[in-house]
Image (cartoon, helix red, strand yellow):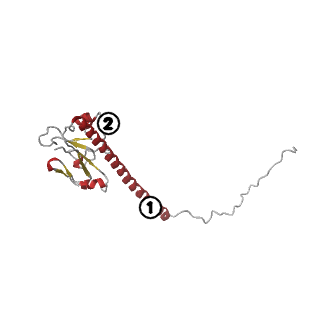
Amino acid sequence: MNTYMSRICLPLTPVNTGVSLRGKRGFTLIELLVVIAIIGLLSSVVLASLNSARAKTRDAKRISEIREIQKALELYYDDHGYYPFTSWVGSHQTAWETGALGTALEPYLPTMPVDPVNSSNISPGYAFNGNYNYSYYSAGYRAPGQTNQQWYQIVFRLEDTSNPIQNTGDVIKCNGQTSHYDESIGIVVLGGSCVQ
C-alpha cells in the first residue's frame, strides 16, 4: 500500500442540522393577496406623482420655449419696426416653421420650438380651443394710423392648472381691447408690445 495515499470514507447517512422541514408552512393565499394589494397601492401612488412631475416638466419647457419665441420676436421688431404678420398659426401646422412666422424668425431662432405634446384634436386645432400647442396671431394688431403689426398674441396651454402663470387674468392690448381665454382649461395668453 502506498504510504502517501490514504482513503477517506464519508458516511452515507445525512447529517442532522437540527432543522426540520416538517411542520413548516408557506404563506397563505390571503397573506399573498394582502402583499400584492399593498405593492399595487404603492406603485399607483408612485406613478401618479411621476405623471405630475412629467406634466410640470413639460410646462417648464413650454414657458421656456415661449420666452425664446418672444425674444426672437423682439429681435425681429428691433430690426424691422414691426412683428411678423400672420393670421392664426399653430405649432401643429407645417406653416409654423415654413410660413411667415417661421421664415421671419429663422435668423433669430433657427428651429421653431414645438409644444411637447403638440396636439390638435379639438377643431380648429389651436391652443385657445383646448389643444396643447403654441398659437401665434398678429393680423390687424396695429395702432391707429399704423400699417405694420405693433403687437401680437401667443397662446399656449399648461397642464398644471395650479401654476402661478395661470392666474394672470386678462391681457390688455392696444386701444383698450382685452383678450381673455378660459383659464379653467389651462390656457395662457401673452401679449406683445403695444405702440400707439
Q: Position of residue 46 (x, y in %)?
A: 42, 56
Element marked by disc 1: helix
Pointer 1: what residue?
37
Which quadrant of the view contains residue 5? top right
Pointer 2: what residue?
111
Could you tell me if residue 94 is visible in this image? no
Along the line of sight, which residue is nearer the eye, 109 or 142? 142
Q: Position of residue 113 (x, y in %)?
A: 31, 40
Q: Is residue 150 above or below residue 8?
A: above
Along the line of sight, which residue is nearer the eye, 35 or 1? 35
Q: CA distance from mark 2 to mark 1?
A: 48 Å
Along the line of sight, which residue is nearer the eye, 124 or 65? 65
In the image: residue 13, left or right of residue 84: right
Specify the quadrant that holds the C terminus. top left
Q: Position of residue 176 (x, y in %)?
A: 15, 50
Q: Position of residue 81 (x, y in %)?
A: 21, 37
Please name the amino acid that badge 1 sits on: Ala
In the image: residue 102, left or right of residue 20: left
